[in-house]
Amino acid sequence: MKLKKKVAIVTGASRGIGGAIALSMARAGADLVVNYNQDADGARSVARKIEKMGRRVLVVQADVSCGEEVDQLVERALKAFHKIDILVNNAGIFIASPIEEVREEDWDRVMAVNLKSVFLCCQAVGKHMIKSKSGGAIINIASISAHLPEVNGGAYTPSKAAVIGLTKLLAIEWAKYNIRVNAISPGPVMTPLQRKAYSSQELLEARNRAIPVERHGKPEEIAAAAVFLASEDAGYITGEEMTIDGGSRISMFHLVHRLAMCT
Ligand code: NAD
């Protein structure tokens, strides 16, 4: 119960990594604000599981790339729970395209959902944490793609690299307010977003072989790290990027396989 009596907002929590983070934080004792944009059924299903654990939960529809909607999300969270201790910026999208063919509107959309949303949510929640002198923990979900770009990754890699930069900036600016800001960079994790990347079982198996531990990560394995970073156990950790990728980032074998898959 490392997060007992804490209140957490998780963006894009209707499924995948965000859903797992919301459930793991609830299991660790937190009350939850489950944000979603379009997947109302998914969000309600996550919320029901949280309620069954005996935690309080608020489901809020909001497009986190829109400032007005983010303000409403934070207002509703404060009205329901009177405080926010933890913010997890998880919502993200991926639009595949060779860089020379990326459409301006796709670039803008990916940047808005993956990067601008992090700025908007951090600003709205951070203002509250600063004013209330309560401190807090913010966790931004980046990606290993910030270091190992995906071929045809479009705006995704730049957006995630910028999330890591923003995390470090916020960490030093807000350290004096006792707000810790960290990033998690997952490698491939089997979620609806990731599943779309594989057109065949062969491709999925080849991808698994390119990961030193020879499998995709599970959403729960990312969620466990988020619970740790949100807890007092991580009280001296800020501005850090935790890579959770089954060893991919340090493996030359992985890079060679990736190149082979792309030619
Ligand atoms: P997913 O597609 O399964 O879930 C994404 C969630 O974000 C969904 O709930 C979706 O409704 C929500 N969302 C999308 N746009 C939104 C918006 N504008 N406002 C509010 N919510 C919105 O994806 P996932 O695989 O669980 O990925 C979650 C995060 O982890 C993303 O930021 C992604 O970039 C990152 N990530 C995923 C992987 C992976 O392999 N799955 C690897 C590295 C990083």
Image (cartoon, rainbow, N blue to C red):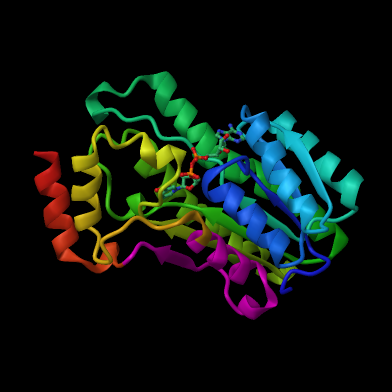
Residue at image location 20% in from the left, 41% down from the top:
203
Residue at image location 36% in from the left, 62% down from the top:
245
Using residue 28 as the reference point, say whether residue 84 is left or right of it.
right
Q: 16 and 84: which one is in front?
A: 16
Q: Position of residue 211 (x, y in %)?
A: 25, 60
Quadrant the N terminus occupies? bottom right
Q: Position of residue 59 (x, y in %)?
A: 76, 39
Residue 242 visible here: yes
Using residue 155 as the reference point, say whether residue 19 is left or right of it.
right
Is 44 located above or below residue 138 in the figure? above
Quadrant the C terminus occupies? top left
Q: Is residue 237 magenta?
A: yes
Residue at image location 14% in from the left, 43% down from the top:
261
Using residue 227 as the reference point, say whether residue 127 is left or right of it.
right
Residue at image location 28% in from the left, 28% down from the top:
97
Q: Is residue 218 magenta?
A: no
Q: Position of residue 40 (x, y in %)?
A: 68, 30
Q: Position of residue 204 (x, y in %)?
A: 25, 44
**Which quadrant of the view contains residue 79?**
top right
**Which quadrant of the view contains residue 75?**
top right
Using residue 221 as the reference point, say whether residue 204 is left or right of it.
left
Is 185 located above or below residue 57 in the figure? below
**Which quadrant of the view contains residue 74?**
top right
Residue 63 visible here: no
Magenta stretch, residue numbers: 221-246
Is 175 located above or below residue 106 in the figure? below
Q: How many marks?
A: 0
Is 29 located above or below residue 77 in the figure? below
Q: 200 and 182: which one is in front?
A: 200
